[in-house]
Image (cartoon, rainbow, N blue to C red):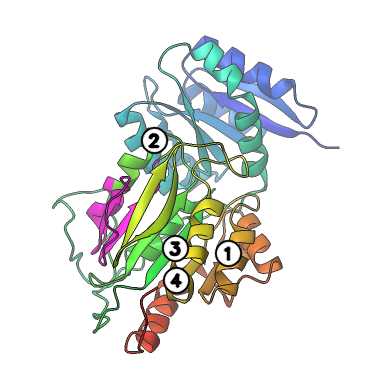
Amino acid sequence: MAKTRVVVVDDSALVRSLLSEIINRQVDMQCVGAASDPFVAREMIRNTNPDVITLDVEMPRMDGIDFLGKLMRLRPTPVVMVSTLTERGADVTLRALELGAVDFVAKPKIGVADGLKQLAEEITDKIRIAAKAQLKRLAVPVAGPAAGHASPGDAAAPQRPAVTHSLGRLSTEKIVFIGASTGGTEATKEVLVQLPPDSPAVMITQHMPPGFTKSYAARLDSLCRIRVAEARDGERVLPGHAYIAPGGMHMSVERSGANYIARVQAGEPVNRHMPSVEVLFKSAARVVGPNALGIMLTGMGADGAKAMREMRDAGSYNFAQDEASCVVFGMPREAIAHGAVHEVLPLTQIAGKLIERLRSTVGASMNRV
């Protein structure tokens, strides 16, 4: 069996040594080089032709983001970013995902050696996923100037598409539920930036560790016409808002009188994940029923597939991202295999079809649960 060839790029000799050891302990992968900075890495990559690169976010001489941008333009290669659990680390990591990195691993600021050893399974799992991932830049269609509440002069922010027409009479009963994992940060953005300000509420579970979802929500909020924030336990779920499950917490929806509320709680991982799509989608089936719309985006594994079938059985209308536009097709494939999906669509078409579906039902009479 051919081994996955990995190059490690990190300015820390300790981290290079630990990552090399973790990789070489696996029967299906091999560390073929470890570089202390992007200049050394450039020659090493040229000589070893790796299948996957692990890349430190912050390094001297040339930072990981600059190097990643050059790499994805000149020699596209699957990259797993190694990030520090800091606010700056989170912001830079999100930029790396925009540039085409497949995924990231968050290393602790202190106790790095023990921390990386504990993350060994996650690191090697993400290298395996990256080796099979479809590399792509998820470009947002550009049609006219950005029109939301992004900061002027935000050079990293792509312009949004022309304003989508209002949905008209809005039902506050409708809620959109999105599940995503590997590749999902950009895929979710592609859907949300196209939604009009009077969109129904959107609840999103994206597999992401603690410390990153707050920055991710803020980034989306700067780009979208709807408001986007990390969900808080007990808050009312409102139209025109999107709620991101906080890293390390499960999110679900509950009913409180005439209102929907977000429930954010710690617990045990479900399908190895916390937050888990299964938890969110099960609550959608139980609480929202026929007023739910489900979207399964790119991601590894099967988290949420069974619960999405429960949503369909309860009357929801469900979409899945197609294989060609996924970074990893696992979660959509499993949802389709469970008979949970009504329409399988390229990523760029999902928001439009969602809006069409909402328009077709927005005037219908809907009873409160």
Q: Earlier in the sequence, mark 4 or mark 3?
A: 3
Give coordinates of residue 185: x percent, y percent: 43, 50
* Region of the chain picked out in magenta, as a range: 218-246
Q: Nearer the viewer, mark 3 or mark 2?
A: 3
Q: Residue at x 55, y 46 (%)?
A: 76
Mark 3 and mark 2: Cα distance apart in space:
32 Å
Mark closest to the chain's N terminus, 3 or 1:
3
Marks 4/3: CA distance?
Answer: 7 Å
- Give me the C-alpha separation between circle 4 and circle 1: 11 Å
Q: Does dot 1 land on a helix, a strand or a loop? A: helix
Numbered mark located on residue 108 in the image: none
Q: Disc 3 marks which amino acid?
A: Phe
Q: Which residue is mark 2?
A: 65
- Lower sequence index among marks 3 and 2: 2
Callout in the foreground (2, 1): 1
Numbered mark located on residue 177 in the image: 3
Residue 16 x %, y %: 56, 16
Which amino acid type is marked by label 1? Answer: Met
On screen, residue 199 above or below 58: below
SS category of the residue bearing label 3? strand
Proximity of marks 3 and 1: CB atoms separated by less than 8 Å? no
Who is closer to the viewer here, 233 or 5?
233
**Residue at point 55%, 64% (across, down):** 325
Q: Residues within 10 Å of mark 2 (few under 14, many from 20)?
A: many
- What's the distance in space between the residues labelled 2 and 1, CA to CA? 36 Å
The image shows residue 33, relative to residue 337, as above or below, that is above
Judging by the rendered image, the residue that carries numbered circle 4 is 292
Q: CA distance from mark 3 to mark 1?
A: 10 Å
Q: Are marks 4 and 3 in contact (CB under 8 Å)?
A: yes
Query: Is residue 240 within the magenta segment?
Result: yes
Query: Do the residues bearing badges 2 and 1 touch, measured as CB atoms within 8 Å?
Result: no
- Characterize the local packing of mark 1: few (<14), some (14-19) or many (20 or more) Cα atoms within 10 angstroms: many
